[in-house]
Every structure is written in C-alpha cells, then in structure tokens.
Image (tube, rainbow, N blue to C red):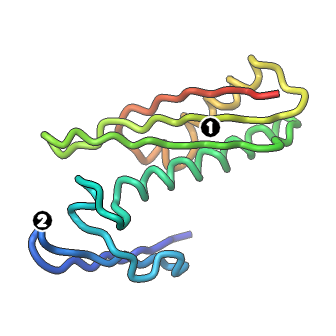
Amino acid sequence: MKRTANAVWSGSLKEGTGKLTTQSKVLNDNDYCFNSRFGDGKATNPDELLAAAHAGCFAMALSMILGKEGYTPDSLDATAQVTMDTDTLELTGSHITLKARIPNISEDKFMECANAAKENCPVSKALSLKISMEATLES
C-alpha cells in the first residue's frame, strides 16, 4: 500500500506560500506558510499534520490491540503534540495525551495496551524522536 501527498511552494521561505494536496483530496490545495509554522498564521503546517497522523495512528493501533485482548473501547481521545527546537529546526518529540473509556479493563492492562500502541503504531515507528505519553482511563 502506498499513499501520496503533494506540496507546491512558491517564493522565499518567509514570504512564500505553499499548497498541500493529499491523495484522498481531504487536503486539496490547502495553504501552508512560514507564519503558520513558526507564528500564528491561519494555515496548516507540516508539524501539525505530523501530530494529526501520530494521534490518529496511535488511536487506531490501540483499538486493534484492545480488540485482540477482548476489549472494545467506548472512546479513545488521543492528542499528539509535536515539539520543534526552532534554533536547530529539529523535531524533538511527540507527546501523546490519551483519555480512554474502556469497559471492564484494569488499569494495568490498559497501560500495557496503551504502551504497546505508543511503541508499535506505524507512525511511532517512523519517527526518530522521543515519544512520551500520558494516559488516563476514565470511568
């Protein structure tokens, strides 16, 4: 399976603009720019797209792992926060915050499954940065 996305950039780094399009067309000529990445611009940017991919992948992986263990989650609310060191222009981490509602699961089994998803979702495996997590099982 292969997925594609396209980026078109015009102009200098700070004054230029770009357009992002995904194979599914969910993003279709969506704007991105320097100010949306390093300031408060109202367009997307690669870092928030990576965070969205990580959160989505993690939640799907956790659902799969839970299913194999005999659990069906009522909800998995996963947020990924990607951090960049703007001095070195290096992505330094992705922190996942998870709030989960899973009937009849123990705290130990929940954490075992959440940690397995954190380590093994395909996006986690693709990232060469520190991945941390804070997980809460809600009743």
**Label 2 element class:** loop
Q: Is residue 10 left or right of residue 132?
A: left
The residue at which mark 1 appears reads as 117
Quarter of the figure with residue 135: top right
| Quarter of the image that includes the N terminus | bottom right
Label 1 sits on what residue type? Ala
Q: CA distance from mark 2 to mark 1?
A: 37 Å
Q: Residues within 10 Å of mark 1 (few under 14, many from 20)?
A: many
Q: What amino acid is found at the position of numbered circle 2 in the picture?
A: Lys
The quadrant the C terminus occupies is top right
User: Label 2 neighbourhood size at 10 Å, few (<14), some (14-19), many (20+)?
Assistant: few
> Observer-nearest residue: 125 or 14?
14
Rendered image: mark on residue 60: none
69 lies left or right of 112: right
Q: Position of residue 133 (x, y in %)?
A: 53, 29
Q: Nearer the viewer, residue 91 or 19?
A: 19
Position of 107 relative to 86 (above/below) = above
Q: Which quadrant holds residue 39?
A: bottom left
User: Which residue position is annotated with label 2?
Assistant: 14
Q: Give the mark, 2 or 1, whose residue is nearer the N terminus.
A: 2
| Residue drawn at point x = 56 percent, y = 34 percent | 97
Residue 5: give x, y in percent of width and height: 41, 74
